Amino acid sequence: MTIDQYSPARIADRFMIQDLIYRWCRAVDRLDRQGMLDVFWPGAIDSHGPYIGPAEGLVDWILERHKPIQVSSHFIGNLLIEFASEEVALVESYVRTIQQYPPAAKHQLAQLTGGAVGQPDAAVDMFTSSRYIDRVERRGGEWRIARRDLAQDWKQIAEVHYKALQPREGWIIGRRDGSDAVQILRQELGLR
């Protein structure tokens, strides 16, 4: 059976899948447990480098590992969607991440680099280039990830000699504690 990759129905599916990938990035960067869980089907498997197992365990691992990390930013670049059927798609998403690890988070950093942590007393920024390779399935009209493999292409760490952001009164600063500006506005607007 040949699937028309660009029929009106597939175009609508593409937008839903794109939003799914973007929602993951927002949820992980804001440490939104439910938001992270909502992009996976229950029992989905994630192979995320040092963590391989059910997505529910991945979310718990991320929440614990990210506790000391104050800055995290996931950015999606190329997003390629190929429909294997009307209910299954292969999605390859290029993802760049930037995270800042304080000296107390060297253990968490070592988990992702395979051991590299920089100088023991220095904060570091970690930059990555990876790809999410997802099997995405539609069940009951909803697209979610059934399996994710993280292909790690490149990582770099750079010591932080000083914090370049010196916020002034009134500046809006990204937060990972449930009180980020987007989370507050979503609540005000009645968005889940």
Image (tube, helix red, strand yellow):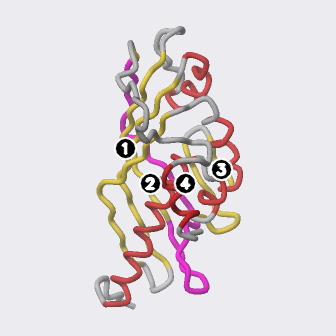
Say if the magenta span includes residue 83: no
Image point 37% across, 76% down: which residue?
14
Circle 3: residue type: Val
Sequence-first tag of 2 and 3: 3
Q: In front: 159, or 133?
A: 159
The vertical placement of 10 against 146, above or below, is below
Q: Which mark is residue 132?
A: 2
Circle 2: residue type: Tyr
Q: Is residue 138 left or right of residue 79?
A: right
Image point 44% across, 54% down: which residue?
132
User: Which stretch is magenta?
Assistant: 135-158
Looking at the rendered structure, the secondary structure element under dot 4 is: helix
Q: Which mark is residue 27?
A: 4
Measure how far apart labels 4 and 3 are at the Cα level: 10 Å
Q: Are marks 3 and 1 in contact (CB under 8 Å)?
A: no
Sequence-first tag of 1 and 2: 1
User: Residue under circle 3?
Assistant: 59
Mark 2 or 4, closer to the camera: 4
